[in-house]
Image: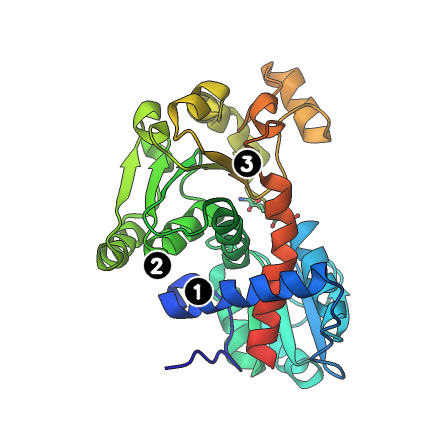
Amino acid sequence: MPVNLKGRSFLKLLDFTTEEIEYLLDLSEEFKRMKMTGMPHKYLEGRNIVLLFEKTSTRTRCSFEVAAYDLGLGVTYLEPGTSQMGKKESIEDTARVLGRFYDGIEYRGFSQKIVEEIAEKSGVPVWNGLTDEFHPTQMLADVLTIKENFGQVKGLNFTYFGDARNNVANSIMVVCSKLGINFTACGPKELMPEKELVETCKELAKAQGSKITLTDDIKTGAKDAHVLYTDIWVSMGEPDSVWDERIKLLQKYRVSKEMMEMANEDAIFLHCLPSFHDTNTTIGKEIAEKFGIEEMEVSDEVFESAQSKVFDQAENRMHTIKAVIYATLK
Ligand code: CP
Ligand code: NVA
């Protein structure tokens, strides 16, 4: 059956079939080609979307804005703390108001329940721009980048190093299990994904002929990996007090040149960004002064190496988000 996502929300990848995810990836490639060749694609002129952010952003916000402009859409950006939502107006009422004004709503914020509620009450497609539990638009860019480097994705070995129970790690495990990519979470036992999600993904992976592995052993994680991925050690919304423990738990999982050498000879490094690979940020400096470490989740050497595809990956956020907007609003 042909895939049709018109009117659907994009809240988490568990809601989408393998074919639907592949369709979004194909569409992303098409939009990337159009952008590269300067072919206009203002297919959604006359419609409007709103971007509701309760956490900060560079890539996700800019991707939604540029994608929307390219598609001919009008865009409103509501920055953290500047709408009535939460303080003076319930999520339910906010969703019902925004649904009257806009054709689609992007939400970045805290609990997954909030984005689910906005989708339920607004009556228009809602796109999850990151919650505490999931970051589904990021995954499309990640898989597109892998496809560009390896030609296809099925059967590849993907290892995520670090805080393996955060929003990015959860979403990667889901997308890998849906697309037949072998997924390994490599990190301390304390930071492994929730059992229920692991079981769900194991079932999905089995149906696609791939595996889900959890390990605290770096060699097991790095050996033969095609993709080595990491994310920051403390996510937005977590208290500063967790830094101390996180650094103790995660230092040995920093993606290093030695790990890249254990991996497949064509291995690539990916990171959703932003990244603490040096001390050129306020937090990076503070951590260096307090804990004496100048690199966190990835060494600067790996981040800056030819194997690192993080800026291609960042660019792909825009092409893939454009595909999601178009597919659900067209
Ligand atoms: N990767 C990502 O979501 O980046 P931003 O936080 O800058 O949007
Ligand atoms: N895990 C990170 C991802 C940022 C894109 C966070 O939630 O802050």
From the viewer's perspective, tell me whether residue 317 is left or right of residue 223.
Answer: right
- Is residue 304 something one can see in this rendering? yes
Q: Is mark 3 within 8 Å of ligand 2?
A: yes
**Residue identifier under label 1:** 22
Viewer-side label of 3, 1: 1
User: Which residue is painted at 59% across and 17% down in the image?
Assistant: 293
Assign the C terminus to one quadrant of the image. Answer: bottom right
Using the numbered discs, state the Cα–Cα distance from disc 3 to disc 1 in whole angstroms.
28 Å
**Residue identifier under label 3:** 232
Q: Is mark 2 within 8 Å of ligand 1?
A: no
Q: Amino acid at mark 3?
A: Ile
SS state under label 3: loop
Q: Give the x, y percent position of residue 217.
A: 31, 25
Of callouts 1 and 2, the N-terminal one? 1
- Is residue 125 something one can see in this rendering? no
Q: Amino acid at mark 2?
A: Lys
